[in-house]
Image: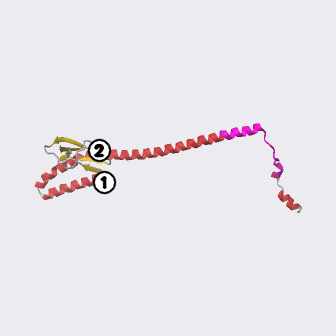
Amino acid sequence: MNKDDEEINETPEDEDIEKDTPLDSSEIESLRGENEKLSKKILELNDKYLRLAAEYKNYQERSKKEKIRIHSDAVSEVVSVLLPTVDDIERTLPMFSEMEEKYSKGVNMILKKMHDSLKKLGVESFGEVGDEFDPSIHNASSKSDESSDDGKTVISDVYQKGYKIGGRLIRAAMVQVSG
């Protein structure tokens, strides 16, 4: 080996490294204690992070549900204001059928547009003659003398349709029952 090769292999760092100096037991215990503290701190921070992530996910889900509920409430309020107009048009139709056909056709067109608008808002009507009576969504205002063949209480006449949006009741159907 020449002199240049020896200089390349030697670095100043090699000279500073102490050769296998043993640590005394107090230093080892101190390092173990510090290691345990740091491990506990890591576990605490990880737990804190996981809880925060779970809370944030729950917040997002609650916010989403709340937005849907607020939208549903707003639509329900608007629809409940419009329903008396729909009822009036439906009650007027039989009178127009006796009058001129043009009037009847016009009112039918208006009613169809109203029903289409309600459908676009996600509103469903219910309460048809022959449906089984359900006290949670039907309001029985009278009872007919007829009886059903199968012994069930059924709707024999509809005075006012019921409406709901999704699973939420906007207005119960006012019906006559037989049974």
Dot 1 and dot 2 residues touching (CB under 8 Å): no
- Residue at x 65% of width, y 41% of height: 38
On the image, which quarter does residue 173 sit in? top left
The vertical placement of 103 against 53, above or below, is below
Q: Nearer the viewer, mark 1 or mark 2?
A: 2
Stretch of the chain drawn in magenta: 14-37
Nearer-the-camera pick, 164 or 138: 138
Q: Mark 2: give few (<14), some (14-19) or many (20+) Cα within 10 Å.
A: some
Nearer-the-camera pick, 74 or 149: 149
* Residue 25 belongs to the span the image colors magenta: yes
Left or right: 64 with respect to 143? right
Residue 28 can be seen in this image: yes
Q: Which residue is mark 2?
A: 169
- Residue at x 64% of width, y 41% of height: 39
Q: Say which quadrant the C terminus sits in.
A: top left
SS at badge 1: helix
Could you tell me the amino acid type at mark 2? Leu
Give whichever of discs 1 and 2 has the lower sequence position.
1
Q: Where is residue 116 drawn, in percent x and y?
A: 27, 55
Q: Which residue is mark 1?
A: 120
Q: Which mark is residue 38?
A: none
Q: Where is residue 95 drawn, in percent x and y?
A: 12, 51
